[in-house]
């Protein structure tokens, strides 16, 4: 019985959760970049932050919810990184 309680479900909910985590990671990376840009103004820090935020989020999310959600955290930071790379 305990094995059934610990089994993770797979399905459409996992996709929605992954997309939700992508949005959360993107918003968090933007907030951190904006604040550090105000404090320091270093372009290199701003370009590296989306990747760092995505990795940190992915590690935590994977430990809590599983690999599908962690993939969403990584994907969420990519648009931010691409935007900063091309517009700065």
Image (cartoon, rainbow, N blue to C red):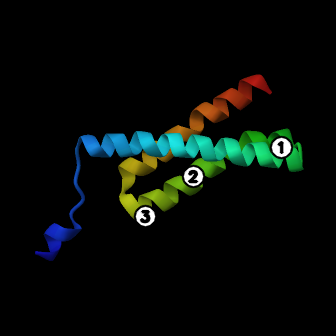
Q: Which of the two discs, 1 and 2, sits closer to the camera?
A: 1
The quadrant in which residue 26 appears is top right
Q: Visible in this render: residue 51?
A: yes
Where is mark 1, residue-wise? Answer: 37
Where is mark 3, residue-wise? Answer: 63
Question: Which quadrant of the figure contains the N terminus?
Answer: bottom left
Percent from the top left, x then y, of residue 41? 89, 43
Q: Which of the two discs, 3 and 1, sits closer to the camera?
A: 1
Percent from the top left, x then y, of residue 72? 45, 43
Q: Visible in this render: residue 50?
A: no
Could you tell me which secondary element the residue under label 2 belongs to?
helix
Percent from the top left, x then y, of residue 87? 76, 23
Residue most toward the top? Answer: 86
Percent from the top left, x then y, of residue 6? 23, 68
Could you tell me which secondary element the residue under label 1 belongs to?
helix
Residue 55's disc is 2
- In the shown orientation, is residue 34 left or right of residue 42? left
Pointer 1 local density, CA inside 10 Å: few below 14, some 14–19, many at least 20: some
Q: What residue do we see at 88% from left, 50% from top?
A: 39
Instruction: Work out how far the residue at label 3 is from the one at label 2, CA to CA, in angstroms.
Output: 12 Å
Q: What residue do we see at 72% from left, 31% from top?
A: 84
Which of marks 2 and 1 precedes in the sequence? 1
- In the shown orientation, is residue 1 left or right of residue 10? left
Question: Which quadrant of the figure contains the C terminus?
Answer: top right
Instruction: Work out how far the residue at label 1 is from the one at label 2, CA to CA, in angstroms.
Output: 20 Å
Which of marks 1 and 3 precedes in the sequence? 1
Q: What residue do we see at 44% from left, 50% from top?
A: 70
């Amino acid at each position: 019985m305990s094995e059934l309680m610990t089994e993770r479900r797979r399905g459409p909910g996992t996709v929605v959760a992954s997309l939700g985590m992508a949005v959360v990671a993107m918003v968090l990376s933007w907030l951190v970049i904006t604040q550090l840009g105000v404090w320091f103004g270093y372009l290199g820090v701003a370009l590296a932050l989306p990747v760092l935020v995505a990795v940190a989020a992915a590690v935590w999310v994977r430990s809590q919810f599983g690999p599908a959600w962690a993939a969403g955290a990584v994907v969420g930071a990519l648009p931010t990184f691409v935007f900063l790379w091309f517009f700065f």
